[in-house]
Image (spheres, rainbow, N blue to C red):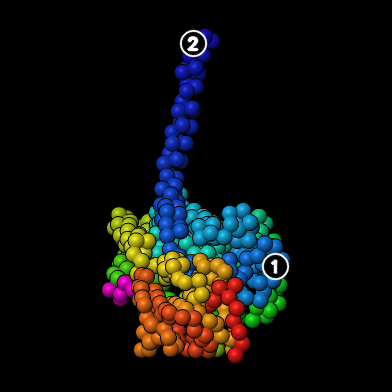
Amino acid sequence: MGGSALPAAAGRPRPTSAAAAQRASAMSGWWPLLAITVLAAVLRLSTLGLQSFWYDEAFTPVHVLRAGLGATLHNVVHTENTPPLWYVLEWAVSRVLGTGVIALRLLSALAGIATVPVAWAIGCEFQGPPTRRAAIVAAALVASSPLLVWYSQEARAYGLFVLTASLALLCFVRALREPTGRRLAAFALTASLALLTHYFAVFLLVPMALWLVGSAAPKGSRGKLAPQERTANPKKDLPRVLCAVALPVLVGMALIPLILAQGAHGTQWIGESALASRLEAIPQYYLTGYTGAALGHGVELLVLLVILAGFGYGLWSTLTPREERGALIVLTVAGAGVLIPVVLAVLGADYLAPRNLVAAMAPVSALLAIVIAAQRTGRVGMGLATLLVLTLLALTIDVNLSPRLQRGDWAGVATVLRAAQPDHVITTVELGAAPLEYYLPPLRNLARGSSVTVTEVDETGYAPLRKSASRPPAPGFRLSERRNIHGLIVYRFTSSAPVTISEEVLREHVITIAQHPEVLVRASSTGKTI
């Protein structure tokens, strides 16, 4: 009896040692996600306040956010063309942190960082453990994408749109594999949140909903499912799926009155731009980011060649059945998210702004990760994936360091204008109005048909300039200064004595060739009707 106790005692440390080794192995498997998430946070947070607000961002604190939530929602209805979720959250943030640049961009930055582990989870769904190749690459692509970093640093709804659409994609994939009540409820909730964030979410959600319904049908596609994707109780699947799909449908229907009330505010610029140029910008956005055009087609071609090399090698190496199905799923979702708006634009319902397609980057990233980092591609596949991530990372860093690739420096323009004489008037293009109102309060638009008496006229804009840009706006003025602030231009005209000048003359003298000139004066200035 005493002898038998010795082996038992000696064996006690072994489970503890094995458990410790298992925990260490699990930790070592998660460190890439931690490292990639930290990288995403550094890229988004370290330069969050570096760039100025541009028009859309400044419009939010100037014309939308108010002290009361009711007044804010009223402005959303009458000045915006986006669902209310982001504005409600931004209103809450502004009540706590204020309306500074970093405060208003923080929500987008946090959403962008949170999208990285979601992309990781999506990648895990299409490659069984212990392989995490697709998860690592999907997370790294989301973390380093110039397009996603850009919208993670913008005080608008796009960063939250990408996060909610990515969550809906993840919940859809999990519910497709195992349509339990909990998983279907998660899909219904995240799909609804995506719709409440951006109307273009519907184009991503339609194929998800159809696929879920089709997979739950008693016949047809069920027989094509992989064994791990078949459910234990098929008779209960379809009613549960229909209930899950019904919630985002109801949310979408509830948004229709808001859509009609908003009446597509601020979308007139879309139709003013040729459809062909917007179609050309879509792949450009995905390859090199929002300001990638300034880099030239050579850089776009470089990124495209890396993608084609990795994609071609992945297909040549042959995907596993699970990877093949995963690639088909995300390709369908991404394709619908891009192609449906394109078709609608061609048919006349033209709201095709490339930025509205930003959430399709989530399934696109998943597609690239699944194919390039497929299990059978080995080290070559991971090498090509690493090259792609490093290329995107270099582009992102270039944007963060190069003013020519950044948003217009309206804060710099405001710094120059602060040295203006008290009795001055500012002319600008429409895109400069809200930023200047934000950085130089209190400004207001000079009423139509009125005039103002000033000794200084400051004209702001950007190329292309009018041929008459350097000419004085009225007799008595002379050009005293010309400044170029990272591509934004300020012409300062001064007069030795006050001159009365009409709003119509000022509006016609905006230095930029633009269709929507603005005339701004201090709120304390009094313009008289002429």
Query: Foreground: 444 or 176?
Result: 444
Q: Position of residue 300 (x, y in %)?
A: 32, 72
Q: Position of residue 147 (x, y in %)?
A: 43, 66
Binning the other alpha carbons within 10 Å of mark 2 as few (below 14), some (14 to 19) or many (20 upward) gives few
Q: Residue at x 38, y 82 (%)?
A: 478
Q: Residue at x 37, y 61 (%)?
A: 400
* Amino acid at dot 2: Gly
Of the 4 image quadrants, the one containing the N terminus is top right
* Magenta stretch, overall SS: helix
Q: SS at mark 1?
A: helix
Q: CA distance from mark 2 to mark 1?
A: 82 Å
Say whether residue 89 is visible: no
428 to 405, vertically: above or below: below
Do tag 2 and tag 1 residues touch (Cβ < 8 Å)?
Answer: no
Of the 4 image quadrants, the one containing the C terminus is bottom right
Q: SS at mark 2?
A: helix
Query: Foreground: 290 or 209?
Result: 290
Q: Quadrant of residue 40?
A: bottom left
Query: Foreground: 226 or 26?
Result: 26
Say whether residue 416 is visible: yes
Q: Quadrant of residue 176?
A: bottom right
In the rendered image, residue 119 lying in the magenta stretch gets the answer no
* Amino acid at dot 1: Ala
Q: Residue at x 57, y 81 (%)?
A: 446
Q: Residue at x 41, y 48 (%)?
A: 35
352 to 144, vertically: above or below: below
Residue highlighted by disc 1: 71
Query: Foreground: 171 or 426?
Result: 426
In the rendered image, residue 297 lying in the magenta stretch gets the answer yes
Q: Range of the magenta residues?
A: 292-298
Binning the other alpha carbons within 10 Å of mark 1 as few (below 14), some (14 to 19) or many (20 upward) gives few
Residue 3's label in the rendered image is 2
